[in-house]
Amino acid sequence: MDYLVGIVLLVCGVSPSAGLGPPETKRNVPRLKLSYKEMLDSNNLITFNGLANSSSYHTFLLDEEKGRLLVGAKDHIFSFNLVNINKDYLKIAWPATPSRRDECKWAGKDILKECSNFIKVLQPFNQTHLYACGTGAFHPICAYLEVGKRPEDNIFRLETSHFENGRGKSPYDPKLLTASLLIDGELYSGTSADFMGRDFAIFRTLGQHHPIRTEQHDSRWLNDPRFVGVHLIPESDNPEDDKIYLFFRENAMDGEHTGKATHARIGQLCKNDFGGHRSLVNKWTTFLKARLICSVPGANGIDTHFDELQDIFLMSSKDPKNPVIYGVFTTSSNIFKGSAVCMYSMSDVRRVFLGPYAHRDGPSYQWVPFQGRVPYPRPGTCPSKTFGGFDSTKDLPDDVITFARGHPAMFNPVHPINNRPIIVKTDVDYQFTQIVVDRVEAEDGQYDVMFIGTDVGTVLKVVSIPRESWHDLEEVLLEEMTVFREPTPITAMDLSTKQQQLYLGSAIGVSQMPLHRCEVYGKACAECCLARDPYCAWDGTECSRYFPTAKRRTRRQDIRNGDPLTQCSDLQHHGQHEWPGHCGIQGHLRSGEQQHVPGVQS
Ligand SMILES: *[C@@H]1O[C@H](CO)[C@@H](O)[C@H](O)[C@H]1NC(C)=O
Ligand SMILES: *[C@@H]1O[C@H](CO)[C@@H](O)[C@H](O)[C@H]1NC(C)=O
């Protein structure tokens, strides 16, 4: 194990008046680096190494109430116990039928890698059932899965009496991604809807209404997209204004960029969009998309763009209308490997969707902001009493529908908060794949702790700490942990705040680990303080989990400065009995600083 904190102990005893700040940290050196074996040996990892006839543990659904993690894999659905994924797990075998497998083989597909039922959709349907879809050996199929109402019911059963067509819900090809969300009995999915993997669309299926989708064969709407997430975000307190947001990457629009380029996108739809009346029948009339920018300025004046959106995490706040959006991006370049995390605010997203539409007069023209008269009601507005003043998208005037069909993209992009990434990694031989974020109460404020999965089976635990202000963030890499027995991309991630555990999926298995292992930081106050892990504090005898409710005087923690001099110097001088001040940032305030420093803007 690497104990980087060890060195600083020497500094601690030197001179309490020297005013030493936190030690200079190398950006890529974690405070704690644990190998797969060290994780297992220290009881910090539980792994489910899969069944011989299964793989591809890529589809996660966390059910905190029932205490289960549902995982869709190749030919199987699993229900794991959140306490320990290796104890009393349940499984259902759901292979493709032999005739489907034969058809798939005859169509020239790989019998082992492609002609199975890869589960791509797992969504809660009602109080007792989930909805599940798989590729069905290039013939998508869906079914209801009974899980019972209460945890003690212990029901886990596929309703095999009733299968549904999975077209427009799950892709045919297991390599393709799908993003789905089931709400009020309706399934929203961004997926590919044909055997060849050319017809990508955003669908709404199930429920009482006719299925609805994006315009077909129009590259202005979608241009070979890969969907990574879909979320409902309310726009006002009136549910009529509820919007569905899709996150994806796709080829840049024709003429938007010279050469082949990928852009990251956020797309919006109204939940109560039922399509047009005379045109755009059974197509979305409120679809709009905007580019998500995540870039850093280069020395030569050329920005380095991270355009390959890999994953999205929404950090909810007290106001459901304004979650913080975390995005994980990589570069498109073959020569230059890089990853970044960018953060976006919903107010910036809404401003872009209310801004100018992208417009061009013909294929040989440039895209410009549309300057003409925008028809009323403004395309993208939901039918509601709050903003729209109209009852249904079927009542939209023809000029609105015509405009909406020709102007699905916004001209302005959405820039990240502070106009730059919060994390950039360019000098390492791995890339980011997944992210989940936990909001943690610490002694000196709230911090968002990020758990970032990589393509080599490791997880980075990173906290971003304000230096002088909210606009100047310092990225602290707390831990780097190997969670799979061999290097493999982490493709699914979920976090249980109730269990304080993180769950990880990959092609080869599922792993589970605690969000914190405070004791591993060391056996001294200084080591604990220097770790700057918001989960951990020195309690007088050991480095342990910090609870904001615990008696303040006994807890020592300093996330913002990580300064053991203010926190632990009395221990050096007087032994470990009395503690005059609290373990906060007292005594280390720089001029002009407020004592109350929130780690996260609320
Ligand atoms: C996989 O193997 C298990 C036993 O190890 C068996 O119960 C299950 O039915 C098999 N699944 C398939 C899809 O063949
Ligand atoms: C949930 O949906 C399933 C499948 O349609 C149905 O059989 C079941 O009765 C429903 N349960 C409840 C509680 O509505």
Image (cartoon, grey):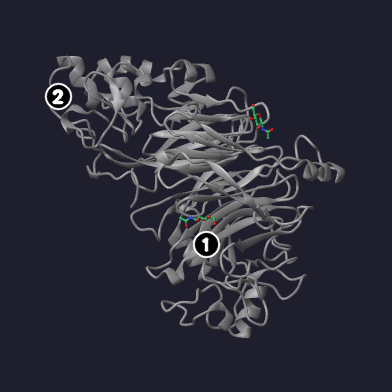
Q: Which residue is mark 1?
A: 244
Residue 130: x and y in percent read 53, 50
Residue 278: which numbered mark, if any?
none
Q: Is mark 2 within 8 Å of ligand 2?
A: no
Please state if 571 lies on the left or on the right of 257 as rendered: left
Residue under numbered circle 2:
579
Q: Is residue 203 visible?
A: yes
Query: Could you say which is closer to the camera, residue 315 or residue 272?
Result: 272
Q: Nearer the viewer, residue 280 or 267?
A: 280
Residue 391 in the image: above or below residue 548: below
**535 in relation to 61, above or below:** above
Residue at 38% across, 58% down: 320
Indicate which label's residue lies in the foreground, 1 or 2: 1
**Going from the N terminus, do you reach mark 1 or mark 2 first?**
1
Q: Position of residue 29 (x, y in %)?
A: 48, 26
Whether residue 449 is visible here, answered yes or no, is no
| Residue for point 25% across, 24% down | 565
Apparent side of residue 63 relative to residue 492 in the rendered image (left or right): left
Indicate the position of residue 180 as horizontal and vertical percent values.
Answer: 58, 53
Q: Residues within 10 Å of mark 2 (few under 14, many from 20)?
A: some
Residue at coordinates 81% horizontally, 38% vertically from top-left? 110
Q: Looking at the image, is 165 positioned above or below residue 218?
A: above
Q: Position of residue 67 (x, y in %)?
A: 42, 38
Above or below 7: residue 467: below
Element type at marker 1?
Answer: strand
> Residue, x 60% and y 33% (percent of image)?
506
Residue 269 lies in what quarter of the image?
bottom right
SS for dot 2:
loop
Relative side of 104 to 241, left or right: right
